[in-house]
Amino acid sequence: MKKLSFFLLIIMALALASCGDSNPVLTIEGGSITGVQTPTEGVIAFKGIPFAAPPVGDLRWKEPQPVVPWDGVRVADTYGDAASQVTWDPESFYGREWRASGSVPFTEDCLYLNIWTPAAGKTGKKLPVAMWIHGGGYREGFSYEPEMDGGEAWASRGVILVQVTYRLGVMGFFSHPLLAAESPHGVSGNYGLMDQIAALKWIHNNIEQFGGDPGNITIFGQSAGAGSVQSLCASPLSRDIISSAIIMSGGGLSDLRPGIMMDTAQVAGKNLMDHFEKTTLEDMRALSFDELTKMSGEYAAATNKRVWWSPVVDNYVLTGTFTNVARAGEIADIPYMIGFTANDLNDMTKPVADFCALRAEKSQKPAYAYLFARPLPGDDAGAFHSADLWYVFNSFKHSWRPFTAGDEELSNKIVDYWTNFARHGNPNGLGEQTWSPYTSQVPQFMLLDADEDKAVCIMTDSPEYKGNTFSWF
């Protein structure tokens, strides 16, 4: 009996040791951390890792500050709060599509990231890393919405997926002369972009602990997340640590978006606060998010002037618009993948084509263009803005739509293309080169489509934009 008990103890000890090896304690900025096993064998998730101090109180509307250290081993099993925002109406199109409104806490304490890795603790593994930036018009959204639940699909292909959260709306992009006066760089606004840059630098400094290669970091995003990718590729603060970039439904070269200058944004912010007799930073920082949101609405109604919450050209984070910086040859000199959906917000064919042609002229690094053309099953919304997210993250299990075998095959092809690109800067990987870079000599897009039974992925020189098919809001 004693021998049996002894052997049972040995077996239990070996089992615990095995678990410890597959899910080790890591040492990162702030302290020690451990993740949680996922349903996919070998993939560990680390949720809610702080990459900066909470931007609350006196840190509201300031550059992100270093992580606050913690004691003991932090178990990273819970997502951090999403950024303060006005959520989608659950009866609106996107409210029904994502089914995410009201499902998570929304607070100012939002600077957290999530990591899925198949190589936790294997510092010599040097796996490629992909940093995801969510969209939402710089006003709403969060990194772990149901349609973005793709960590296991990416990590099982040997690419570490990192999702980042950033300040939104008035908390992320408010400009005011008093904020510039207290800033060490004389700027205001762009706090959301500075959060993203802080997250990128955190990844560069810490990702080896998760088995990643700090020299191979792809950034990718959709809609405002794609605009953020463009900003990070243009910013002198971040462009040198990006290895490749994917721009999804964010446009390309365009003179229709002249950019907002910081001085203009500061006048708008000051006028808003002066309207309500808020003349000190102490007064402004004492306002709640709900109060600030209400003030913005009342100000717009009273003055017919709307304050826009979006990036500004401040000559610190951004020295110009993406278009102007790209034309000057000063964006990150890396491979790009860029595209949009067949029923997107607008026709991006020419902006995307012009960007790819410019890159072919200025760089030896390729630019790949695509059009996502699959009309989603279940209604007549078509290949709408954001429809491709279900495929990029292979997250169909969260959707109400009757996806088919063809959709599943298309999703697997897209995840392969995207992860190949993160690994090699080439969506084909090292296999057959079926997706050619876009150049003036070979002006082709990859058409990503499917029918009920199979995926249809072909090169075309005439991508067809079909226009919006419904009311977005």
Image (spheres, rainbow, N blue to C red):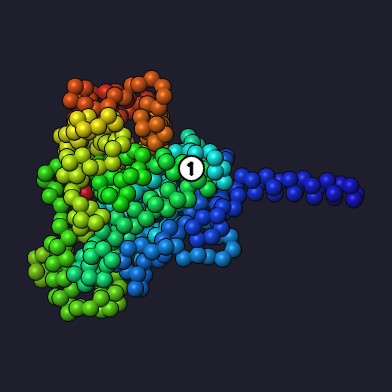
Q: How many marks?
A: 1
Extreme-left residue of the structure: 304
Res 38 visible: no
Q: Is residue 449 left or right of residue 309?
A: right
Extreme-top residue of the structure: 432
Q: Is residue 103 left or right of residue 318?
A: right
Q: Residue at x 36, y 32 (%)?
A: 425
Residue flagged by tag 1: what amino acid is it? Gly
At mark 1, the secondary structure is strand
* Residue 410 higher or lower than 189, as above or below: above
139 or 33, nearer to the observer: 33
Q: Position of residue 203 (x, y in %)?
A: 43, 49
Q: Position of residue 280 (x, y in %)?
A: 23, 78
Q: Position of residue 367 (x, y in %)?
A: 27, 32
* Residue 37 higher or lower than 417, as above or below: below
Extreme-front residue of the structure: 184
Q: Residue at x 69, y 47 (%)?
A: 17
Q: Residue at x 39, y 46 (%)?
A: 131
Res 23 visible: yes
Res. 360 image quadrant: top left
Which residue is under mark 1?
Answer: 212
190 or 15, nearer to the observer: 190
Q: Position of residue 382 (x, y in %)?
A: 25, 37
* Residue 235 higher or lower than 431, as above or below: below
Residues packed near mark 1 inside 10 Å, few (<14), some (14 to 19) or many (20 plus) = many
Q: Residue at x 29, y 69 (%)?
A: 289
